[in-house]
Image (cartoon, rainbow, N blue to C red):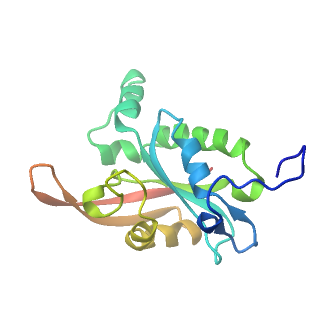
Amino acid sequence: MDEKTGHLIYLERVADLIELSTGEKFSPQYIEGRAKFSPYVQDMMTIGGADLDFVSAIIVFDFQNVSRWAEKRGIAFTTYVDLSQREEVYEIIRGELRTINESLPAYSQVKRFVILHKEFDADEAELTRTRKLRRGALHEKYHALLEAIYGGRRQVHVSAEVKYRDGRTGMVETELRVADV
């Protein structure tokens, strides 16, 4: 809502707005676009729905920037998965989300989040070739993660097949932390 004119301003197509159980609508692309300004966030998918009463997010952190940040602070890690679940990484992402939330109406602020154990991948149908989120595929693939976020759980076990660049495949199993902003 523009305070000067009283006009309602939509920043994307009305069909792309997501309605919460409260009846309020939010713009996922606007929130995700704000996250792109963070040096620590590579991708973010905001979640909400008619049966959900708050906005949450799945975060893919920028490994290059976060690993440099961790090394400068003497934070030891071995892999992307290991670094993704460190308390220190959750703290910097939480800070970034708080900054984003300051510019949003209360109903569209991100309340809970998970840092994903891997990057979104076009080869796994999570992104288009132009790096746009495939929301339907992501909701289906990470259904257990969403249940944990909205079910009030603090952790969720994930098991995922990983495809390496050389064509090999493997399995990654880990516990992902669910955190409050």
Whether residue 180 can be seen here: no
Q: Residue at x 47, y 36 (%)?
A: 40
Q: Position of residue 42 (x, y in %)?
A: 43, 42
Compared across the picture, whether 1 is left or right of 67 comes to: right
Compared across the picture, whether 169 is left or right of 158 comes to: left
Compared across the picture, whether 127 is left or right of 38 comes to: left
* Along the line of sight, the residue nearer the viewer: 139 or 123: 123
* Along the line of sight, the residue nearer the viewer: 153 or 168: 168
* Along the line of sight, the residue nearer the viewer: 126 or 153: 126
Q: Position of residue 68 (x, y in %)?
A: 37, 26
Whether residue 30 can be seen here: yes
Compared across the picture, whether 20 is left or right of 41 comes to: right
Q: Residue at x 36, y 58 (%)?
A: 127
The residue lying furthest to the bottom in this view is 51
Q: Residue at x 38, y 25 (%)?
A: 74
Q: Compared to 73, does 104 lie above or below?
A: below
Figure disc tally:
0
Q: Compared to 51, does 115 lie above or below?
A: above
- Quarter of the image for residue 139 reads bottom left
Q: Compared to 153, does 31 lie above or below?
A: above
Q: Position of residue 25 (x, y in %)?
A: 71, 65
- Quarter of the image for residue 129 reads bottom left
Q: Position of residue 36 (x, y in %)?
A: 51, 40
